[in-house]
Amino acid sequence: MMSASPIYTLLNKRFLLALSLLFALLLAHYFIYNQTMTEENLLHDKQNIHNRLLQSWYNSGYALYSWQYADHIISPKKVKQQLIKIDSLSSRLDGSENGSLPSLREQSKRLVISIYRFAGQKYPSEWAFDLQKQKLIREMENVTTRIAEKSKQLQLRLADQSRESRKISLILLIAELIFLQLILIFLLRPVARKADKQFRELEREKEEAVNANNAKSLYLSTMSHEIRTPLNGVLAMTDLLMETDLTFEQRDYLGIVQASGKDLLSVISDILDFSRIESNQLELMEMNFSLKQLLQNVLETFEEEARDKGIQLLHYFEPEVPEYITGDPKRLSQILTNLLSNALKFTREGEVFIRTSIQGDGSGRNEILFAVSDTGMGIPEDRIDSLFQPFKESRNSLEKRFEGTGLGLALSARLVELMKGTIWVESEINKGTTFYFSIPLRTDPHAKTSPLAPPEKDSAELDNEPVSESYSLPVRDLQILLAEDNTINQRLMERLMERIGYKLDIARDGREAVMMAQNKRYDVIFMDLQMPELDGLQATRKILRDSPGKKPFIIAMTANVSQEDKELCFQAGMVDYIAKPISLEKVKEMLSRFEK
């Protein structure tokens, strides 16, 4: 389980503290507001009681005014009901008033009793009745006046309380806003500054990583050139020796040297391809090609090895799979070559079987499914997860004879991902392993189909683009110039040209090549890219600019095999590209394009 980063932990702590303080402030705001509203509600209740009591006394006073001596006898029941209501309201009045006068509640209750007695008493004369009524009316007016004043006081207090509540709410709101600002300043701003600092550090580290990756790619490209240059001499001279009269033992020794040199070249190519994929510099081609022919070419490459080991090499191409598809045949061939090589490597007896079929992904899109099965030792389950990691191999520690870089499967997995496909493996110990990979099926019936040549062992070598028909030369001896600063490569090309039947002039650097091209008309110039004085690109531009009439056909010859180098060559005016190490077959094929 991954631990949280320090900035994440600090941010969580600061946010928790800020939320806790804000919650406490909101809780205090709630209690203060609730207390204020309680006091306002209490004042509202008191004012309602006074208003209702005042209205009741008004009604009683109107009734008292309307009483006459002749019919002053009133129903005791009605009088009792009215007085009970007034007495109930009077009981709810505040009895803690200060001053020499009795409290309003006591005065109201005494008046209730007096009215009750007046309503039930018989008077001997009209004069006595009026006297008692006038006395009650004066007391009633006094009570109603006091109640009205008390109600007005309550109304004023209620207005003051409302203003005070609004003031407190405004003060609390301002306090909350200030507190939020303080949270942002003292709690969150330091976190933001630290996060910004870490973000800038990550940006710097990312830039350093990108620069380091570019430097690594440049270093690998340079090392490729330095390694391929002597390797060119080893393999090419071995080819020349193989065509001489040799004993069986000598031919066997040279075969081992040649195979080892090609294995070294394959390792270099895998490392360069993997580096270009990691730095997003590897681009896939788009062309229409024959899938059947590609598979046949790949199988032919391993027929001799399978025959020597006594292993059957089988393939089944399902009928529903289209023969022609659109994609990158070179990279697809590279994936199949790596998987087949791995299968043969870990299979002692039995068979290696390739099955090609069509499967759907459930969304209407079809994919081509390749399955490469073997009857080898199998892969332990705990090793499968790391199988597609570079520089790792899933092998028993006792099986020391199965060695290698472990790059083949990792490179194949990256190439499948670039093709927007998937790759996986199923294995059983001592029964065999099956590698599956699928890529989207794309077809273009209107595209021109490109023929496929048998794949080279050098997977990093760029495809040579055909020269247009306007570059064909008449039948005559070709005047050929080699611009190369390496002595071994000079001698090698001399021997290769002698074997083919051509003579070769040699320039030891780019400046000498320009001078020789000015003094003599050459048909074909093999131009190395990395040379002192003038590099191959600069020399090419000068030769093409200064050559009168028909221009020579300049062919790049270098160990740099990246797509960028190829594009630079064509931009400089070169017509073709040949990658080191150079073999006799490559030179023959290249020169055959300039002859009828």
Image (cartoon, rainbow, N blue to C red):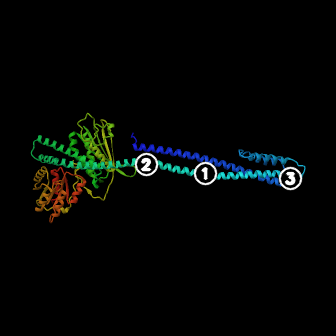
Amino acid marked by disc 2: Arg
* SS assignment at label 1: helix
Left or right: 483, with 405 as reference point: left
Q: Amino acid at mark 1?
A: Glu
Q: Which mark is residue 130?
A: 3
Percent across and percent down for residue 394 are 29, 38
The CA distance from mark 2 to mark 1 is 36 Å
- At a point 10% along the width and 43% down the height, the residue shown is 246
Which image quarter holds the N terminus? top left
Residue topped by disc 2: 189
Identify the residue position indicated by label 1 in the image. Answer: 164
* Quarter containing the C terminus: bottom left
In-image side of 41 versus 544 (left or right): right
Residue beneath the point at 71% across and 44% down = 96
Category of crowding for the residue at label 2, using alpha-carbon neighbours closer than 10 angstroms: few (below 14), some (14–19), many (at least 20): few
- Could you say which is closer to the camera, residue 111 or residue 325? 111
Query: Do the residues under discs 1 and 3 have CB atoms within 8 angstroms?
Result: no
